[in-house]
Amino acid sequence: MMRLIFPLLTVLCLSAVAEEPEAAAPRAAELSKKVKPSLVSIEPAGRDGEVAGVGTGFVIAADGLIATNMHVIGEARPLRVTLPDGKRLDVTAIHAWDRKKDLAILQVDAKDLPVLKLGDSAALSQGDYVAAMGNPLGLRFSVVEGVVSALQEVDGQDMVQLAMPIERGNSGGPLLNKDGEVVGIVSLKSTLTENIGFAMPVNDLRALLEHAAPVAMKNWLTIGALNEKV
C-alpha cells in the first residue's frame, strides 16, 4: 500500500437527528433492504446526560455483538442503541476496543439479531464497487454508493480510501461490497472535499474479535470519571 499523510481529515463524528431519506439507486436499494435490519443507531450521552448525537453500528453476532468506531462511543459515557424498528437495546459491556484503529465492539442485551456477513478486505481492489449505510447528519439508515479509490496508509494505518459522499454520523457504519458483505468500517472524511472518505479494513475488526477483553458497562462508565472527593 502507498503511504499517505493526510492532516486534513476529520472523524465522522456524531450528528444531529433528522428524517430518513429514500434509497438512491437500484443496486443500493437492494443492498439497503438486505442490510438495514442489521444496523443500529448509537447515541452516546454528553457530560450533561443528554444525547450528544448519533453514530452508527452493525450486528456481527446474533447474540448481541455490535461493531462501531471507538470515537462514536467515547469513554465513560452511557450509550443508547436503537434498531431500525425503534426498539432500544441495553448495552451490557464493551466487548473489545482499539483506540489506535478506532474500533469498538459492544455487547447488547438481545438474542437472534440479524447478522451482517464479514467479507475479506484483503480482496479489495482499486475501482471496486462499494456502498455504505449509516446516519449521516442524523438521516437515519441512509445508503450511499461509491468505489474504492485507493488502498492507502494514513498516519501509519492501512485504510480503504473511498470515492463517495459520506458525512458526520456515518461513523461506525458498514462499508459493503456488491454482495452485501462488510469489507470495512467507515471512519474518516476529508475536510476539503465531499468525495474522499476512509474506512478501516474489516480484517482489523476480525483481529479485534480474536483478542476481546470485555468490560461490564458499569465498570466502563468509571473510566476517566472524576473523583468528587478531590
Image (cartoon, grey):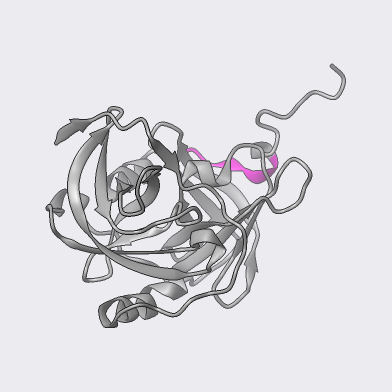
Q: Quadrant of the N terminus?
A: top left
Q: Is residue 94 above or below residue 178?
A: above
Residue that protrudes farthest toward the right in the picture: 229
Q: Is residue 212 left or right of residue 80?
A: left
Q: Residue at x 40, y 31 (%)?
A: 100
Q: Residue at x 38, y 80 (%)?
A: 33
Residue 65 visible to the viewer: no
Residue 177 visible to the viewer: yes
Residue 226 pos. (x, y %): 76, 26
- Give the quadrant of residue 179: bottom left
Residue that protrudes farthest toward the front in the picture: 192
Residue 83 pos. (x, y %): 56, 70
User: In front: 112, or 165?
Assistant: 165
**Magenta highlight range:** 213-218
Q: Is residue 189 magenta?
A: no
Q: Quadrant of the C terminus?
A: top right
Q: Residue at x 53, y 74 (%)?
A: 20
- Give the quadrant of residue 146: bottom left
Q: Is residue 209 left or right of residue 128?
A: right
Q: Is residue 12 above or below residue 86?
A: above
User: In front: 18, or 79?
Assistant: 18
Residue 170 pos. (x, y %): 45, 56
Number of numbered discs on residues: 0
Residue 174 pos. (x, y %): 37, 59
